[in-house]
Amino acid sequence: MPFRIFCRVLGLVLCSTALTVYFASHSIGTVVVTTLACSLLLQLAYFASVLFLIWRSGWVSRAGQRTEHFGSCEDIGCQSPDHYEVTSDSADSLQNQMLATSLLLP
């Protein structure tokens, strides 16, 4: 979202909140306090969403690195005695992680 549109939406939300509170309470002091509280709440929500996106991108990145690790192990031919059992378990685990990741994506 471009910054100009973001500022317009933010201003629209704050103005509509201010007008609603003014018509409900007829008090300028209440309008100022409520508008500042609304602004703070919007900033906290924005900060939390950015932190969530950073956390999610790191989690998906780690899942991708695990996938690359399993692929490189097969390329060089390292196999354990229970190779089928190990790959089956790791594939199930990886499939569950990818399913969880796909549920988090919008």
Image (cartoon, helix red, strand yellow):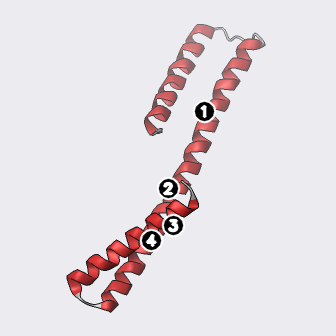
**Up-down relation of residue 14 to residue 61 (above or below):** below
Total count of labels: 4
Q: N-terminal of the two: label 3 or label 1? A: 3
Residue found at the far right of this picture: 76
Circle 2 or circle 4, nearest the eye: 4
Around disc 2, counting alpha carbons within 10 Å, would you say few (fewer than 14), some (14 to 19), or many (20 or more)? few
The residue under label 3 is 7
- x then y, percent, for residue 21: 27, 80
Around disc 1, counting alpha carbons within 10 Å, would you say few (fewer than 14), some (14 to 19), or many (20 or more)? some
Q: Amino acid at mark 4?
A: Gly
The residue under label 1 is 63
> What mark, if any, has residue 49 been given in the picture?
2
Badge 4 vs badge 3, beta-carbon distance below 8 Å? yes
The residue under label 4 is 11
- x then y, percent, for residue 94: 54, 25
Determine the image quadrant of residue 17. Answer: bottom left
Q: N-terminal of the two: label 2 or label 1? A: 2
How far apart, in angstroms, are the residues tagged by discs 2 and 1?
21 Å
How far apart, in angstroms, are the residues tagged by discs 2 and 4?
20 Å
Badge 3 vs badge 1, beta-carbon distance below 8 Å? no
